[in-house]
Amino acid sequence: MGYVSASNTPTIVGAFPYGVATGGTSSSITVSSQAYTLLTFTSDTNLVVSTAGLFDICVIGGGSGTAGSTQAGDHYASGGGGGGGVMGAATSAANTVTMYIPAGTYAVDIGAGGAGGAGASGGGGHAYGTKGLETSIAGLICVSGGNSGGSAGMGLSAGLDGASGGGMGGKTIQSLFGNNGGSHNTTAANGGGGGAGGVGGNAPNATTGGTGGNGIDISGFIGGSTYYAGAGGGGGAVTTGGSAGNGGVAGKSGGQTPGNAGVNYGAGGGGVSGNSTTGGAGAAGALYVRFKV
């Protein structure tokens, strides 16, 4: 199996050939003139390794839902949801995961995206969104999901910590694979959720939400066109919702409900502002396994 160095980057002891496996959806790709078989997992199933050897792995956790919002004489905006962690996107040597896996059958668990929290009318009762769940290959590797953006008022506190933190100051718990959420400006303008590729933006003024943190382009792993995974959601605000980062969704302004749901793998939901406004849901994660042919 792979080993973990002091920098938390999996490394290989010894030299082995690439193995052979099945599972998920199989396709043939070419990256930098090298041919691979790519296995794509978007639901829980098994990875079946028929020939032991090396495998390149890219893991994406589920994106977080964001809090609902409320209004009690003013709008109370929620921060954007944190994006799921992204490990092994092959954007740099430090973010490349190649593991030796023995022959056998391994359970694959794809992290679900979090639901948006419910809003409330007239103050009180609104809720955090639920966090995105981790994606894993049992016994081998896993990466955490993002976490909820907090509310700038009426009972909810700061954004929660996750692979990427929620807007209103949520922190990353896996700094190699995620980033912090942005901070609020007033109760009516909240920060963007952190993304796998960048921090969530602070709300720039009293009526505009912060930009969602960028996702990471995984096209260098899967081949084909640019695709950003693990983006944070834009923050909610009374006048102008926070902009979408790369691969993410924007926050919404006052009274627009529900919040925007994440679309790309591992994307956090968009924040909201206004009376009885439901937060945006996060998108599920994914897992990619490839081997040379």
Image: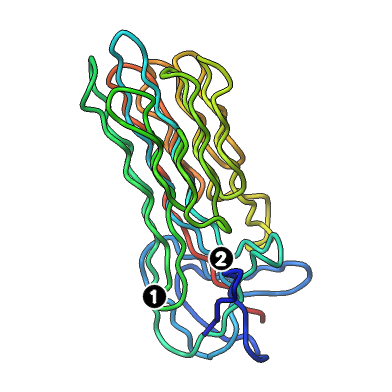
Give residue 13's quadrant in the image.
Answer: bottom right
Q: Farthest right residue?
A: 33
Q: Residue 67: give its label.
A: none
Upstream in sequence: badge 1 or badge 2: 2
Residue drawn at x 49%, y 38% as measured from the top left: 193
**Residue type pointed to by label 2:** Cys
Tell me if 282 is positioned left or right of 59 in this view.
left
Q: Position of residue 49 (x, y in %)?
A: 48, 85
Q: Position of residue 126 (x, y in %)?
A: 25, 28
Element marked by disc 2: strand
**Depth check, front residue: 244 or 165:** 165
What percent of the width, then of the height, locates residue 109? 37, 66
Q: Amino acid at mark 1?
A: Ala
* Residue count near mark 2 (Cα–Cα under 10 Å), binned few <14, some 14–19, many ≥20: many
Question: Which is more toward the observer, 207 or 132?
Answer: 207
The reply to whether callout 1 and callout 2 are in contact (CB within 8 Å) is no
Q: Tell me how the rendering is colored.
A: rainbow
Q: What residue is pinned by disc 1?
A: 138
Q: Decide: few, some or many residues near mark 1? Use Cα within 10 Å; few <14, some 14-19, many ≥20.
A: some
Q: Position of residue 117 (x, y in %)?
A: 30, 35
The residue lying at 54 percent from left, 39 percent from top is: 248
What label does residue 58 carry, if any?
2
Asked whether 165 or 289 is in front, the reply is 165
In the visual, does 219 lie left or right of 53? Answer: right
Residues at marks 1 and 2, CA–CA distance in whole angstroms: 15 Å
